[in-house]
Each structure stands twice: as C-alpha cells, then as structure tokens.
Image (cartoon, helix red, strand yellow):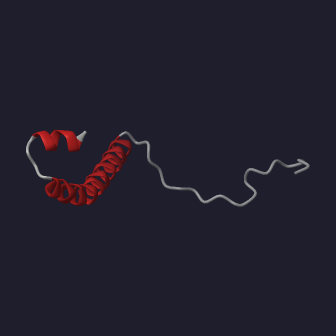
C-alpha cells in the first residue's frame, strides 16, 4: 500500500528503499514507547486505586493439600 501511494506521489524507487530502511527501526522505537507508557499508566492507576500490594513470599509447599496422595 505504501509503495503504491508513494509511487503516485512521484517518489523514485531509490527513495522508497531509503524510507523502508528507516521506517522499521522507527516503528520498533515507537512500539517500545507505546508499550512502556501503557505499562506505566496502568501501574500508576492501580497504585492510586490501592490495587497494588507488597509481594508475599510463599513456601514451596503452600499449595500442597495435607493428606493428598500427590
């Protein structure tokens, strides 16, 4: 789709190769920023709502049922 649109805009094929070479790293950079900001905002809202708590260390057999044949 991008090739068709840029070709109709009069951009030569060499320019398309340059755009494709630069677009991929920029896309990855934008994705990292998007995911990081989503995680940050979610954490801030959860903390404000009181949904975060300190982790509690469990023993290896906390989920083992006494008297079970496992």
Residue at 21 percent of width and 57 percent of height? 17
Point out residue 32 in the picture as x, y percentages from the top left corner.
Answer: 31, 55
Residue 46: percent from left, percent from top: 38, 43
Quadrant where the N terminus is found in the figure: top left
Q: In the shown orientation, is residue 52 left or right of residue 59?
A: left
Residue that sits furthest to the left in the current view: 10
**In the image, what residue occupies the spot 36% across and 49% down?**
39
Which image quadrant is residue 49 in?
top left
Residue 7, given in percent of the width and then of the height, sits at: 15, 43
Q: Nearer the viewer, residue 16 or 63?
A: 16
Quarter of the image for residue 45 reads top left
Would residue 63 be found to the left or right of residue 40 on screen? right
Q: Position of residue 66 (x, y in %)?
A: 85, 49
> Could you say which quadrant of the image residue 14 lies in?
bottom left
The total of numbered circles placed on residues is 0
Q: Residue at x 82, y 47 (%)?
A: 65
The foreground one among 31 and 38 is 31
Toward the viewer: 23 or 66? 23
Q: Nearer the viewer, residue 51 or 15?
A: 15
């Amino acid at each position: 789709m991008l090739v068709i649109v840029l070709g109709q805009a009069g951009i030569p094929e060499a320019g398309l190769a340059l755009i494709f070479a630069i677009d991929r790293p920029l896309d990855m950079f934008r994705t990292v920023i998007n995911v990081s900001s989503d995680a940050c905002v979610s954490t801030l809202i959860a903390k404000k709502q009181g949904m975060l708590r300190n982790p509690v260390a469990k023993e290896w057999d906390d989920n083992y049922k006494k008297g079970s044949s496992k």
